[in-house]
Image: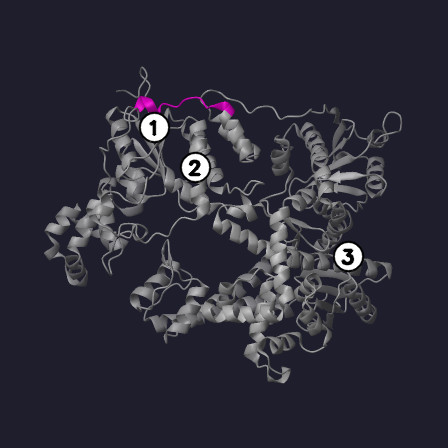
Amino acid sequence: MSGRSGSERSRLLLVDGHSLAYRAFYALPVENFSTTGGQPTNLVYGFASMLANALRDERPTHVAVAFDVSRRTFRTEAFPAYKAGRAKSPEEFGGQLVILDDLLAAMSVPTLRVPGYEADDVIATLTARARAEDGEVLIITGDRDVFQLVDDHVTVLYFTRTVSEPARYTPERVQERYGLTPRQYPDFAALRGDPSDNLPSIPGIGEKTAAKWIREYGTLAALLDRAEEVPGKAGERLRAALDVVRLNRRLTELVRDVDLPDGMGDLEGLRRAPYDLPAFTTLLDDLEFRNPSLRERLFAADPGGGREPAAEGPVVRIRGSELEPGTLGGWLAGPAGDRPVGLVTVHAWARGAGRITHVGLATGDGFATAFEVARLTEADERVFAHWLADPEAAKVVDDAKALLRVSAEHAWEVRGVAGDTAMAAYLLRPGLAAYSLDDLAGRYLGRRPPSPDGPGWASALMVRARMVLDLEATLGPRLADTGMGPLLATVELPLAGLLARMERAGVNVDRAMLGALENRFADGMREVADEAARVAGRPFNPGSTKQLQQVLFEDLGLPRTKKIKSGHSTDADALAWLAERTDNPLPRILLRHRDLARLHMTVAGLLRELGADGRVHSTFQQTVAATGRLTSTEPNLQVIPIRTTEGRLIRRAFVPGEGYASLMTADYSQLELRVMAHLSRDPMLLEAFASGEDLHTTMAAQVFGVAPAAVDAQMRRRIKAMSYGLAYGLSAFGLAKQLGVPVEEARPLMDAYFERFGGVRDFLARIVDEARERGHTETLLGRRRHLPALTSDHHQRRQTAERMALNAPVQGSAADLVKLAMLRVDEALREAGLRSRLLLQVHDELVLEIAPGEEAAARELVRDRMTTAHPLVVPLEVAVGSGGDWDAAAH
């Protein structure tokens, strides 16, 4: 029995399959990793990525993956509560383990499952056999129990909750982390207990004390023999828990002589073997793993030297070279003065931020060139600027907004953009993780764009420019088939230009006021932390989950909240639950601390992003929210509170810039409900809007069967929560949580609501049925959201898709209307020759900077264009206000 060939020393890579799969599943959001057919792939993707990295970096000669069979093992026989506290894995998790088996089989990676034992025991057994033959062992896991196997020739690659680089645990690293040798680790673990395995700890004894005892006495056996010598309360607690500690010690010791399946006990059976390339390639394609980096790493790890098959379809030969200065005009005109032929790609490259440094161009007939902007002659630059501004010169780009924003730094105007591959892909598949050229070329073309960051930049830029055209050729027809071509041409592309101008303009802020607020919130946090320490009886860090758990549940003995991996939850919902159910003031104090911390973080972020011009230049993202909503980043200006006094203080720091007189806000009134009325045609909802009275009061009167004058604040609040919640696919459980009432009380309220507004009920049922039949939902402007999981056999995934189907038409239509309003307002201001300009979009609100003497004209234009942005069966209403700062401009 030998794992060696000649003088070769074996290098065995062992993987704890369930542990690694668990980390992959929770590290990558399932909503961003699924096939077009609705099959989740986040677990398989993350596992494959981590395994590919390990095979590349560690270069093992042998490999195996061990899985648990079930939770019933010899440990549960000895201690039935072992791992009993673990929640059941989501359906999407178990369903992917079968696919993972297929992937490992195609990669010729042996898998082991031994009934009655855990994967750790299998790994310990294989480690012992490899060491008996003088082999090196590397273990990939997220379970610390394996640290007991570490020695000079056994290294543990330990993953935490992410799929980033693992920590390498050698004997030195174990000693550094715990002050113990690997042999002492199971003794220490027995004293510490393990919440994740439901192994009890000794009350009041933490890791530091446990490690100190093992260091002092050498072994757990010696400590227990001399337990009477341990002084103080700690000694009393130890002596009271001797049976628990002895049981823990038996359970934490890994078995090193498991009877393994035939062919697996001999290390030669674990020697790396070539992939089953046809099966492997087919599986990657079925899973839609088109990311070039992942595929490259996986194929590179094939010991048989397998290669990625060439992408299907003709490869267009590129004819061209780096542009010589002074020849750009001739290149654009072509030899016979007839180029460009069809579309031309403009692929800009900016090394660093701010200005374009290099440009690649490619035409539909296979010509391409690239140039460095700094080497353009004055004549070249005039020709290029003229061509960019020519609306008749059709251009395809991979990110219109980025090009438009950066081009403005060169005083170049870009018109005639006929295609944007990022936006086209977003419309076809909203919810993807990324829409960069690198991601899309891998997904749709099966090719990896070369990097222009190096000596071969010109060739790389020409290839990248050609890939943009290839993507357009692939995505354009698909977009046309869905009917979303007009949405791209008349809404998203024009909006890209507007957003680029808004980003460049930024919004002016009062730096001194922000600095004062930062200090104010920091002081407030310290004061509240001191108050929390007084109530708790000792100082602690309110931002530390571990310390909060100790204070709330151990020191103060407050009721236990929901169980999480690290203990019991201390999130905002948990603290609010504790505040309602106990008289202890600490939960409310902690909630106050979190509010102040959030405000402090907001202000600090604004100061950090403040430009030299005194303005904050946020980035508006068009391709993030699957519903079509715009989002704001760096900094996020859509999260600045409006309903709290302190939040409004932050808004007061947003003021008009030099040359402007005021800020103006324009906010749609009840936009989602008006869209709901339009789509559902519910007669009672239409009547409520037509009455001219307060909408939520009128609706509450109808639901509760009372006169409008008899509607109290609680009735109105409940109906408002219900009405808006329905636009987000609210369930009875969700309504109960929002109102703070039992589900048994929320469900009859929902029934009464639907009894009165039957048209809304029927509409919501209809859109789910139609989406299930068609596979997608649609907004007023034809924006689609594909939901293949509506027909999934997985109950939880199907329910999630149904909630999305309820949400998408109303939320997506509202998003479309806001975008139309932005375009109409911007167009009207510019046609009227006004200097006033649009600065921000925050949900259903627009914020403008008003030039002196233009307020009356701007107010009239804004109200007119927003109320007529798109025809609905109920009128669109807009509230407009203005003032010397954002808060004062509130209406």
What label does residue 12 carry, if any?
A: 1
Which of discs 2 and 3 lies nearer the camera? The answer is 2
Q: At which x and y percent is residue 771?
A: 62, 50
| For marks 1 and 2 on the same chain, the one whose residue lies earlier in the sequence | 1
Can see residue 530? no
Q: Is residue 500 above or below residue 137?
A: below
The image quarter containing residue 105 is top left
**Helix, strand or loop at disc 3?**
helix
> What amino acid is labelled 3 in the image?
Leu
> What amino acid is labelled 1 in the image?
Leu
Q: At which x and y percent is residue 477?
A: 73, 37
Left or right relative to 713: residue 118: left
Which of discs 1 and 2 lies nearer the camera? The answer is 2
Quadrant of the rendering where the N terminus is positioned: top left
Look at mark 2 in the image and give the residue it sits on. 98
**Helix, strand or loop at disc 2?**
helix
| Residue drawn where x is 32% and y is 71% of the image | 537
Q: Which residues are magenta?
A: 267-278
Q: Residues within 10 Å of mark 2 (few under 14, many from 20)?
A: few
Query: Marks 2 and 3, how far apart in space?
Result: 49 Å
The residue nearer to you, when weighing 433 against 649, is 433
Q: Is residue 704 magenta?
A: no
| Residue drawn where x is 41% and y is 27% of the image | 59
What label does residue 697 carry, if any?
A: none
Left or right relative to 418: residue 185: left
Look at mark 3 in the image and give the residue it sits on. 823
Q: CB atoms at circles 1 and 2 under 8 Å apart?
A: no
| Residue drawn where x is 82% and y is 57% of the image | 827
